[in-house]
Image (tube, rainbow, N blue to C red):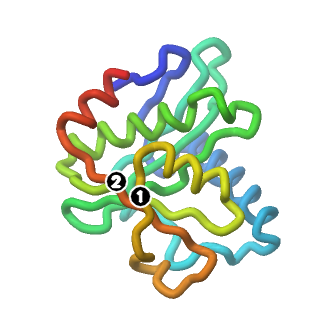
Amino acid sequence: MQTNPRLNIRQVTWANPVGADLRAAQQAELDARFGRPDHEPGPPPSEVDTAVFLVAHDKASGQPVGCGGLRMLDARTAEIKRLYVLPYTRGSGVASSILAALEAHAHALGITTLTAEAGSVQTDGRQFYENSGFVPVPNFGPYIGVQHSYCYAKPIDSHSAAHTAMA
Protein backbone atom coordinates (compact mmCIF):
# COMPACT_ATOMS: atom_id res chain seq x y z
CA MET A 1 0.00 0.00 0.00
CA GLN A 2 3.07 2.22 -0.24
CA THR A 3 2.33 5.28 -2.37
CA ASN A 4 5.55 7.30 -2.38
CA PRO A 5 9.05 5.79 -2.64
CA ARG A 6 10.44 8.57 -0.41
CA LEU A 7 8.03 7.76 2.42
CA ASN A 8 7.32 4.94 4.79
CA ILE A 9 3.61 5.16 5.68
CA ARG A 10 2.58 2.88 8.53
CA GLN A 11 -0.64 2.23 10.39
CA VAL A 12 -0.22 2.93 14.10
CA THR A 13 -2.53 3.05 17.09
CA TRP A 14 -4.19 6.34 18.01
CA ALA A 15 -2.08 6.34 21.20
CA ASN A 16 1.20 6.12 19.27
CA PRO A 17 3.41 8.92 20.67
CA VAL A 18 4.63 10.07 17.24
CA GLY A 19 1.06 10.31 16.00
CA ALA A 20 0.07 12.16 19.17
CA ASP A 21 2.92 14.65 18.64
CA LEU A 22 1.87 15.26 15.03
CA ARG A 23 -1.78 15.79 16.07
CA ALA A 24 -0.64 18.21 18.78
CA ALA A 25 1.41 20.16 16.21
CA GLN A 26 -1.61 20.32 13.91
CA GLN A 27 -3.86 21.58 16.70
CA ALA A 28 -1.29 24.23 17.73
CA GLU A 29 -1.13 25.44 14.12
CA LEU A 30 -4.93 25.54 13.87
CA ASP A 31 -5.22 27.33 17.22
CA ALA A 32 -2.88 30.01 15.84
CA ARG A 33 -4.75 30.23 12.51
CA PHE A 34 -8.19 30.49 14.13
CA GLY A 35 -6.89 32.67 16.97
CA ARG A 36 -8.54 30.46 19.58
CA PRO A 37 -8.40 26.84 20.80
CA ASP A 38 -12.12 26.03 20.49
CA HIS A 39 -12.37 25.86 16.69
CA GLU A 40 -13.43 22.22 16.22
CA PRO A 41 -17.18 21.61 16.00
CA GLY A 42 -18.28 18.38 17.62
CA PRO A 43 -16.21 15.83 19.49
CA PRO A 44 -12.58 15.42 18.50
CA PRO A 45 -11.60 12.06 16.97
CA SER A 46 -10.47 9.35 19.37
CA GLU A 47 -9.21 5.78 19.54
CA VAL A 48 -12.85 4.64 19.75
CA ASP A 49 -14.04 6.12 16.44
CA THR A 50 -10.82 6.18 14.40
CA ALA A 51 -10.66 3.01 12.30
CA VAL A 52 -7.26 3.76 10.74
CA PHE A 53 -4.48 6.13 11.74
CA LEU A 54 -1.34 6.48 9.60
CA VAL A 55 2.02 8.13 10.19
CA ALA A 56 4.38 8.95 7.32
CA HIS A 57 8.15 8.95 7.84
CA ASP A 58 10.78 10.25 5.46
CA LYS A 59 12.76 7.16 4.40
CA ALA A 60 16.08 9.00 4.14
CA SER A 61 16.00 10.63 7.59
CA GLY A 62 13.50 8.44 9.40
CA GLN A 63 11.76 11.60 10.62
CA PRO A 64 7.97 11.65 10.91
CA VAL A 65 6.52 14.13 8.40
CA GLY A 66 2.75 13.67 8.51
CA CYS A 67 -0.31 11.77 9.61
CA GLY A 68 -3.97 11.16 8.92
CA GLY A 69 -6.88 9.04 9.98
CA LEU A 70 -10.31 7.72 9.11
CA ARG A 71 -13.19 8.36 11.51
CA MET A 72 -16.11 6.03 10.89
CA LEU A 73 -19.41 7.86 10.40
CA ASP A 74 -21.38 4.73 9.49
CA ALA A 75 -20.62 1.32 7.95
CA ARG A 76 -19.90 2.79 4.48
CA THR A 77 -18.76 6.35 5.24
CA ALA A 78 -15.62 7.68 6.89
CA GLU A 79 -14.31 11.18 7.52
CA ILE A 80 -10.69 12.15 6.96
CA LYS A 81 -9.42 13.42 10.31
CA ARG A 82 -6.12 14.94 11.40
CA LEU A 83 -4.58 14.92 7.93
CA TYR A 84 -1.48 16.95 8.63
CA VAL A 85 2.00 17.37 7.24
CA LEU A 86 4.83 19.33 8.76
CA PRO A 87 5.14 22.78 7.19
CA TYR A 88 8.59 22.19 5.71
CA THR A 89 7.32 19.18 3.72
CA ARG A 90 4.28 20.86 2.19
CA GLY A 91 4.14 20.78 -1.58
CA SER A 92 6.28 17.64 -1.78
CA GLY A 93 3.49 15.08 -2.12
CA VAL A 94 3.37 13.92 1.50
CA ALA A 95 -0.31 14.84 2.01
CA SER A 96 -1.31 13.27 -1.31
CA SER A 97 0.54 10.08 -0.37
CA ILE A 98 -1.15 9.90 3.03
CA LEU A 99 -4.54 10.52 1.40
CA ALA A 100 -3.89 7.78 -1.18
CA ALA A 101 -3.00 5.34 1.60
CA LEU A 102 -6.15 6.34 3.53
CA GLU A 103 -8.25 5.78 0.39
CA ALA A 104 -6.76 2.31 -0.04
CA HIS A 105 -7.52 1.49 3.63
CA ALA A 106 -11.05 2.84 3.17
CA HIS A 107 -11.60 0.59 0.17
CA ALA A 108 -10.28 -2.43 2.10
CA LEU A 109 -12.75 -1.63 4.91
CA GLY A 110 -15.68 -1.48 2.49
CA ILE A 111 -16.05 2.28 2.78
CA THR A 112 -17.70 3.76 -0.30
CA THR A 113 -17.62 7.47 0.59
CA LEU A 114 -14.92 9.58 2.17
CA THR A 115 -15.84 12.94 3.67
CA ALA A 116 -13.69 15.80 4.88
CA GLU A 117 -14.04 19.22 6.49
CA ALA A 118 -11.80 22.26 6.42
CA GLY A 119 -12.34 25.54 8.19
CA SER A 120 -12.43 29.05 6.80
CA VAL A 121 -8.76 29.69 7.64
CA GLN A 122 -7.69 26.43 5.98
CA THR A 123 -7.72 27.62 2.38
CA ASP A 124 -4.80 25.29 1.68
CA GLY A 125 -6.78 22.34 3.02
CA ARG A 126 -9.87 23.24 1.02
CA GLN A 127 -7.80 23.54 -2.16
CA PHE A 128 -6.08 20.23 -1.40
CA TYR A 129 -9.38 18.37 -1.06
CA GLU A 130 -10.80 19.95 -4.22
CA ASN A 131 -7.62 19.09 -6.17
CA SER A 132 -7.86 15.51 -4.82
CA GLY A 133 -11.29 14.83 -6.29
CA PHE A 134 -13.46 15.81 -3.34
CA VAL A 135 -16.55 17.89 -4.15
CA PRO A 136 -18.26 20.41 -1.88
CA VAL A 137 -21.30 18.99 -0.08
CA PRO A 138 -23.74 20.43 2.45
CA ASN A 139 -22.31 20.50 5.95
CA PHE A 140 -22.92 17.21 7.76
CA GLY A 141 -22.97 16.05 11.37
CA PRO A 142 -21.38 18.50 13.81
CA TYR A 143 -20.63 20.95 10.98
CA ILE A 144 -24.32 21.67 10.20
CA GLY A 145 -24.91 25.36 10.77
CA VAL A 146 -21.21 26.14 11.33
CA GLN A 147 -20.38 29.02 9.02
CA HIS A 148 -16.61 28.57 9.07
CA SER A 149 -16.83 24.89 8.00
CA TYR A 150 -16.55 23.65 4.43
CA CYS A 151 -17.46 20.01 3.84
CA TYR A 152 -16.46 17.68 1.03
CA ALA A 153 -17.13 14.13 -0.15
CA LYS A 154 -15.52 11.70 -2.55
CA PRO A 155 -16.78 8.29 -3.68
CA ILE A 156 -14.34 5.42 -3.24
CA ASP A 157 -14.61 2.60 -5.73
CA SER A 158 -12.44 -0.40 -6.39
CA HIS A 159 -10.87 1.08 -9.52
CA SER A 160 -9.86 4.42 -8.01
CA ALA A 161 -8.60 2.90 -4.74
CA ALA A 162 -6.57 0.23 -6.51
CA HIS A 163 -5.10 2.77 -8.93
CA THR A 164 -4.35 5.20 -6.11
CA ALA A 165 -2.63 2.53 -4.03
CA MET A 166 -0.32 1.71 -6.93
CA ALA A 167 0.48 5.36 -7.79
The amino acid type found where label 1 is placed reads: Val
**For the residues marked 1 and 2, what is the alpha-carbon distance in whole angstroms?**
6 Å
Q: Callout 2: few (<14), some (14-19), or many (20+) C-alpha neighbours within 10 Å?
A: many
Secondary structure under the numbered disc 1 in the rendered image: strand
> As drawn, is 13 to the left or to the right of 40?
left
Foreground of the two, 34 or 56 = 34
Q: Which mark is residue 154?
A: 2
Foreground of the two, 45 or 108 = 108
The residue depicted at 54 percent of the width and 69 percent of the height is: 150
The amino acid type found where label 2 is placed reads: Lys
The residue depicted at 48 percent of the width and 36 percent of the height is: 98
Picture layout, residue 151 above or below residue 82:
below
Measuring from the top left, give residue 110's x and y in whole percent: 17, 49
Q: Which residue is mark 1?
A: 135
Q: Which mark is residue 40?
A: none
> As drawn, is 74 to the left or to the right of 70?
left
Q: Earlier in the sequence, mark 1 or mark 2?
A: 1
Front of the two marks 1 and 2: 1
The residue depicted at 62 percent of the width and 20 percent of the height is: 62
Q: Please say if the residues under marks 1 and 2 sit with CB atoms less than 8 Å apart.
A: yes
Measuring from the top left, give residue 77's x and y in whole percent: 27, 61
The residue depicted at 66 percent of the width and 68 percent of the height is: 120
Measuring from the top left, give residue 21's x and y in whole percent: 66, 47
Measuring from the top left, give residue 79's x and y in whole percent: 39, 60
